[in-house]
Image (cartoon, rainbow, N blue to C red):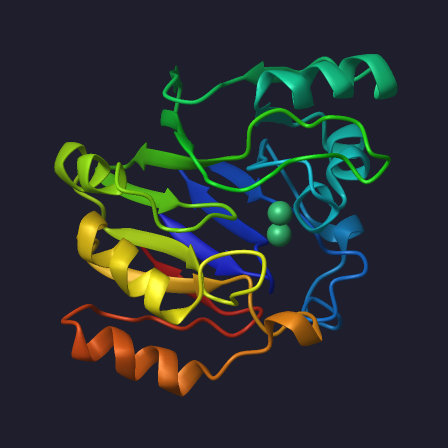
């Protein structure tokens, strides 16, 4: 699997001939400026962790242009159908999984909130466990650490965990170390930082803290990719 970062919580995952956009907040994302345009993104699948604008982002435009399958919680898929007449969607709620031709997705709990930019209720926030090509990628979404992450660390052999680190709206540095200790991933990729003043962070300090705790931090600059 090839994972590319577009800044904030927007990632592109390529596996099994599929291009998967995760939380495609591109337009208005200062970190994505000059890196990528929503009009240029290809997508077979779009994964949404929750309905907040900094994750929902360009979902409708990309979905309408590409016809991608949108995987999100029930409320988000209903909203797509009712407000946007977009029905190529797979609902997936907490603890539920689905087998697709290229891999398996499991919706994981996230301790956060979820409403659309227009105020509509967005269902429960979540994250995704993505198993494909013999690898396992965990995208936590916006969350604090939570104790069931220990179960996730037992149940899944996580190669890469994408964790928010920007504090204020999600876990910060110490929280992400606690999460990594439970999840036991091969590498930790940080997200949800430096996009806006409230979540500016010291990446070097974060990397040092992760290293000290025995984990393997892997920072991606916007536009940069890694093999999972
Ligand atoms: Ni959020
Ligand atoms: Mn967010």
Q: Quadrant of residue 82?
A: top right
Q: Is residue 64 left or right of residue 89?
A: right
In this view of the protein, which residue sits in the foreground, 172 or 136?
A: 172
Q: Position of residue 74 (x, y in %)?
A: 60, 16
* Residue beneath the point at 74% across and 46% down: 53
Q: Position of residue 196 (x, y in %)?
A: 70, 71
Q: Quadrant of residue 192?
A: bottom right
In this view of the protein, which residue sits in the foreground, 222 or 77?
A: 77
Q: Position of residue 114 (x, y in %)?
A: 64, 36
Q: Quadrant of residue 3?
A: bottom left
In this view of the protein, which residue sits in the foreground, 206 or 131?
A: 206
Q: Is residue 197 left or right of residue 139?
A: right
Q: Position of residue 170 (x, y in %)?
A: 51, 56
**Residue 31 against residue 207 in the figure, above or below:** above
* Residue beneath the point at 44% across and 81% down: 203
Q: Is residue 195 visible to the viewer in this orientation of the structure?
A: yes
* Residue beneath the point at 22% across and 69% down: 216
């Amino acid at each position: 699997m090839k994972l590319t970062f577009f800044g904030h919580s927007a990632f592109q995952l390529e596996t099994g001939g599929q291009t998967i956009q995760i939380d495609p907040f591109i337009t208005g994302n200062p970190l994505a400026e000059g890196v990528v345009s929503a009009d240029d993104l290809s997508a077979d699948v779009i994964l949404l962790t929750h309905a907040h604008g900094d994750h929902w982002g360009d979902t409708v435009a990309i979905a309408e242009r590409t016809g991608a399958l949108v995987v999100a919680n029930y409320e988000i898929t209903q909203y797509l159908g009712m407000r946007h007449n977009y029905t190529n969607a797979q609902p997936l709620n907490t603890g539920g999984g689905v087998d697709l031709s290229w891999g398996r997705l499991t919706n994981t709990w996230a301790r956060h909130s979820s409403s659309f930019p227009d105020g509509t209720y967005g269902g429960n926030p979540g994250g995704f466990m993505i198993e494909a090509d013999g690898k396992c990628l965990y995208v936590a979404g916006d969350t604090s650490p939570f104790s069931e992450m220990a179960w996730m660390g037992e149940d899944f052999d996580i190669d890469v965990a994408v964790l928010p680190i920007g504090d204020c709206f999600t876990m910060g540095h110490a929280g992400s170390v606690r999460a990594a200790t439970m999840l036991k991933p091969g590498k930790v990729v940080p997200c949800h930082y430096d996009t806006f003043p409230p979540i500016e962070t010291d990446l070097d300090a974060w990397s040092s803290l992760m290293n000290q705790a025995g984990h393997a931090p892997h920072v991606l600059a916007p536009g940069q990719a890694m093999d999972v």
